[in-house]
Amino acid sequence: MSDRPAALRAFLQGFAHAFRGILFGLHTQRNLRVHALATLGVIVLGFVFQIEPWEWCAILISCGIVWAAELLNTAIERLADRGKGIGGCILLDRHGRIGWAFNTPRMAHAWRTADGNDGDGV
């Protein structure tokens, strides 16, 4: 039974971290502040024009996706700043073609082709 308060505390701490991240983004990212104003404007216009419930859903989901993308971009930028730009990206398109970009010569990589052949390298 004593596990429940700890789980609830961890759950609430997750929200606290999320809100701190949103506040950090609002303080440091000009584009997120623009998105905040646009979101507020869209919500006000939704009330003015008395939009339907399904339209509210579409608008709120769209705004949430935009906010999530902007905050994800902020997180990636922070990680890139902390890592001093060392890393890489591995891509796989829907046809199974591989593309990659490295900015460090010692990055390990591996792949599997559509016919099941494996490869790796450094």
Image (spheres, helix red, strand yellow):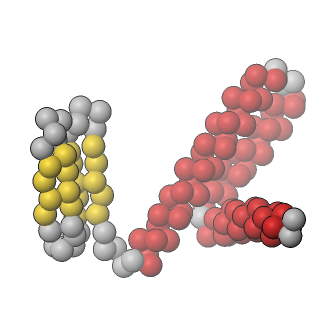
* Residue nearest the viewer, comparing 42 with 107: 107
Q: Is residue 57 visible?
A: yes
Identity of the residue furthest to the front in this view: 1
Would residue 4 be found to the left or right of residue 115 on screen? Answer: right
Is residue 77 toward the left or the right of residue 3 in the image? left
Quadrant of the image for the C terminus? bottom left
User: Which residue occupies 60% across, 62% down?
Assistant: 30
Q: Please state, as top left, top right, bottom left or bottom right, where the N terminus lies in the image.
A: bottom right
Report whether 6 appears left or right of 37.
right
Viewer-proximal residue among 47 and 96: 96
Going 70% across and 33% down the picture, which residue do you hit?
59
Residue 100 rendering spot, x and y as whole percentages: 22, 54
Figure quadrant of residue 116: top left
Nearest to the observer: residue 11 or residue 28: 11
Q: Position of residue 110 (x, y in %)?
A: 20, 57
Name which quarter of the figure residue 21 lies in. bottom right
Q: Position of residue 48 (x, y in %)?
A: 87, 29
The residue under the point 82% across, 20% down is 52
Against 118, residue 13 (above or below) is below
Is the residue 88 above or below the residue 106 in the image? above
How many circles with numbers are drawn on the protein?
A: 0
Residue 118 coordinates in the image, percent (x, y): 14, 49
Query: Is residue 23 visible in the rendered structure shown here?
Result: no
